[in-house]
Image (cartoon, rainbow, N blue to C red):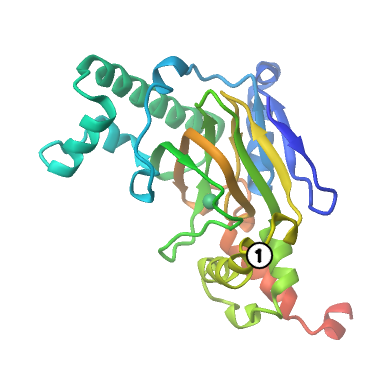
Amino acid sequence: MAEIELNPAVADRFVHLDWQHRDADRAAFDAGLIRHYEAGDIILLGNPPFRIDFDLLNRISFPEGRSHQKLTDRFLTRPKLHRPAIRRLFQEVFGFDILLYARFRREVQRLSDELRRFACLIAPSYRFLKQGVSWRFTRTGPEGLHVDYFRRTEDLHYLRIFINVDRQPRIWTVGPRLQDLIERYADEIGLRELVDRPSNEVCSRLNKLVFDKINAQPRSAMDRHLVRFAPGDVWLCETRLNSHEIFSGHRLVATDFYVDPSSMHDPALRVDARVDDCLRLATADPVRAAG
Ligand SMILES: [Fe+2]
């Protein structure tokens, strides 16, 4: 189970849910889980329903570097081996052990599909537009605190489920919520001019103008929680709403599921709407707002 060192100066939005309690009332459990997720909480799921072949997965490491940092299940299970660079990469990782690769491929496919089914189970109302699953087999971190953002301008809900499939803990630091960052830095980095602009512009500006400076300083420059996710831990976190940093970690599987926001339990909680609300609040004339 995850060990959390809470920093009292940062909002605590960790929520512990135990999958074993689901049987008492499955619909209520699932609704509660999604309600917490849409609220921006970080959900730690106790007794998760996933089988993981740690022995097998922990035999695999990909070379360091950003190009191999995040690999889709499709890339891993159906590699384009006619491309020399990809063939070389797979030879470097698996040698000529065809049996090892065959087992690895089955495990990646199985767990990726389990995650897709799991998401449909806990969020039956969600209309998934894309159910991407990504795997990491490179050592990561410390990468610096940041908020995630989409490169493209899309008003989408995002369901992110993480499983630490490594034998070692995965360590994150978790900083302020997006809404607190907007409130705190609205003046300093000119966020007010981004009202009605897509949320990714706000997130990107926070990363460039706030976090880049903070990450160049000692960790104490910004208050944060420290979380050690144990091997096999499962957590759900909207990584646009929660600033975070991979402090260290190696093997991980994560979902990149895009959801039509109109199918959320509460579409008003989607990231674009939240950012819009925060910016309007930050921009409101304090006298009029008080009246
Ligand atoms: Fe991130």
Relative depth, front residue between 88 and 235: 88
Q: Is residue 274 above or below residue 61?
A: below
Q: Is residue 271 above or below residue 284?
A: above
- The local secondary structure at tag 1 comes to helix
- The x, y position of residue 18, in whole percent, is 69, 23
Query: Residue 25's image quarter?
Result: top right
Indicate left or right for 184 with 155 as reference: right
Q: As drawn, which residue projects farthest toward the right?
A: 291
**Quick one: label 1, few (<14), some, or many (20+) residues within 10 Å?**
some
Indicate left or right for 63 with 197 as reference: left
Indicate left or right for 69 with 243 as reference: left
- The x, y position of residue 156, in whole percent, is 48, 56
Q: Residue at x 29, y 33 (%)?
A: 76
Relative depth, front residue between 207 and 58: 58
- The x, y position of residue 235, in whole percent, is 60, 34
Say which residue label 1 marks: 214
Q: How many numbered discs, if any? A: 1
For the C terminus, the image quarter is bottom right
Relative depth, front residue between 109 and 227: 227
Query: Residue 16's image quarter?
Result: top right
Q: Is residue 80 above or below residue 262?
A: above
For the N terminus, the image quarter is top right
Relative depth, front residue between 122 and 244: 244
